[in-house]
Image (tube, rainbow, N blue to C red):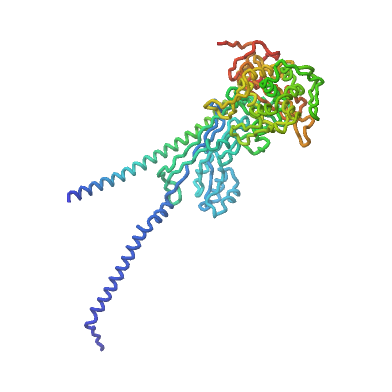
Amino acid sequence: MRLLVGLLMAMVISALAVVYTKYRSRMLFAEIQRLEQELDVYELEWGQLQLEQNTWAEHSRIERLARTRLGMTLPDRAAIIYLKP
Amino acid sequence: MIIIARPPVSDDSEFASRWRFLLLAIMAGMVALVLRAVDLQVLNRHFLQLKGDQRHLGVVSVPAHRGRILDRNGELLAISTTVQSIWVNPKEFQVSPRDMKNLADALGMAVKEIQLRTADDGRSFVYLKRRMSPELADQAMALHLPGVHAAREFRRYYPTGEVAAHLIGFNNIDDRGQEGMELAYNDWLKGVPGAKKIVRDGRGRIIEDLDNLRLPMPGKDLTLSIDQRLQYLAYRELKKAVLQHRAKSGSLVLLDARNGEALAVVNQPSFNPNSRLKMNGNASRNRAITDVFEPGSTIKPFGVACALELGLVRPESQFDTNPGQMHVGHNVVKDVHNYGVLDVSHILQKSSNVGMTKIVMNLPSSKFWAFYNNLGFGQPLETGFPGEANGRLSDHQGWNAFEQATLSFGYGLSSSLLQLGRAYSALANEGVMPMVALLKRDKPAETHRIMSVKTANTVRTMLESVVTREGTAIKAAVPGFRIAGKTGTVKKTGARGYEESVYMSLFAGMAPASKPRLVMVVMIDEPSAGEYYGGAVAAPVFSSVMEGALRLLNIMPDQENGTGADDGPRDGAI
């Protein structure tokens, strides 16, 4: 009889444990999903920032700015001194 | 008065039979219920479970990123960014005219068009608008209309636009490679969508994510061998030359002489891969790799190299090219002028067809053929680029004397620009020819020894004399650097053989000539603004691109004083 009660108790406890772990896993999965969505948003932003950086760093633009705004020119051949190792 | 008396005995037995009947009926009912319960719970359990799950559980795919395409320094050439596509389930789509108007405004579509697309009740999936920016799609979804859904997709952006369009290629609307490297390496680049299990409510909305069935596998990045800075520079200079000479098209390839990696592959005309509405096959072809032509005089150094290698000619051997033409079989080989007696170096410098004919006449055809064959003429490039051309080199068994002569000055065989560049890298690299690559290599290139170090260096020194005042290509000179190269002016074939005054201008060369690092081949097709000589049309492009490339790659000048070209500042390169 005592054995039976003991087994019954054990069964109830294990059933509750199953319910609890299932609940925990659902909660954790929801958390993963939330974080993944957040990651998606960041990835989207990253992609757009990469594109933006590329647009600003476009060679033709840099060259134009260097020539017009900064007044830069290519140095003369004569003005370049090469240091040989 | 009638007295109805109760029948005395028969009552009990009659009730008893009714009682039994009732009991049996109830028992039968119970058995039926139990059997049905067993049937549902045990026998049909899977089927019913499935039906239940079908109404609430679902599997949706999780889109995966396509890999990026980068240049050799990690600069961005192609990237996928997230966009939203709005789709509708016409079975669920019932909205008031006012909501319809709002939706149409949010999508930037006409109400009529939406009605037309959603009219078919038999379908449960209709795209309304694909590839919207996420912000605009969010506005449309904020209306919360029944049956309107958003799906995440990717759109490919090419920040460099037309500059590298031919090499990179493009994708179709479903993000699958259609051209160029996007097609060639589609399997490498593409992402594999994942899948996850979800729970839906009665209206089919996703209320909970249950489980990941398969994680999405993002595509891998692809690193090309090109250098975006050189690609841009080459594209700009080529475009300028094509416009200036009113040419039909033009191509340029720049190779790293030591390992065969392509640093720039540009073509004109080009197209914008971000918006391909006005695109056609003429603009989208990567001519440098897929088109073949007769290489003309640019092939002469190889005829000389073959003769030197076989020991049949010495650098100081003299050839009499008087009177500027000669008969070979029934045909005549002509020079532009009568150059008189020339040594080998001057035959290349003046680009004498008669001199070349005399050099190769004595070569055994099989050896001559094998030499060209080893240089990769008629042989695949093995870059994996879709539509890559092999060119053609006919078998030596059918050659007659005239055919052998024409091969020495570049007619009777065809080659792509990249193949010609590969052959030149053998001269640049002391006789060892590396296989070309369009991807950045992580291991040493496969190489083939074509000729001895001595032969390669001798021919290279001869080619330096071409880029002088006496040679054909003074315009290819780069101040501070020794340049070796060869011009080509090729008559084009039409429907009736070689046509008058339709030319292709070529220049192939390398720098710095003392120890070449770069090999470049420029081709301008049908220049029609007057000039057509390779030295006048293609050589200036070589000069300006090479000057910029040498500086960008920090290559040390190997010449103390100028070649005679102006040393003043140029506005060539960035």
Q: Position of residue B46 (x, y in %)?
A: 39, 55
Question: Could you tell me if residue B246 is visible in this image?
Answer: no
Outermost residue on the left side: it is A2
Question: Could you tell me if residue A25 is visible in this image?
Answer: yes
Q: Position of residue B318 (x, y in %)?
A: 75, 16
Q: Which of the 4 quarters of the picture holds residue B322?
A: top right
Q: Position of residue B186 (x, y in %)?
A: 55, 37
| Residue B66 appears left or right of B397 | left
Q: Which of the 4 quarters of the picture holds residue B493?
A: top right
Above or below residue B517? Residue B180 is below
Front-most of residues A68 and B317: B317
Image quarter in which the N terminus of chain B is found: bottom left
Above or below residue B394? Residue B361 is above
Image point (65%, 14%), residue name? B480
| Residue B490 appears left or right of B4 | right
| Residue B264 appears left or right of B27 | right
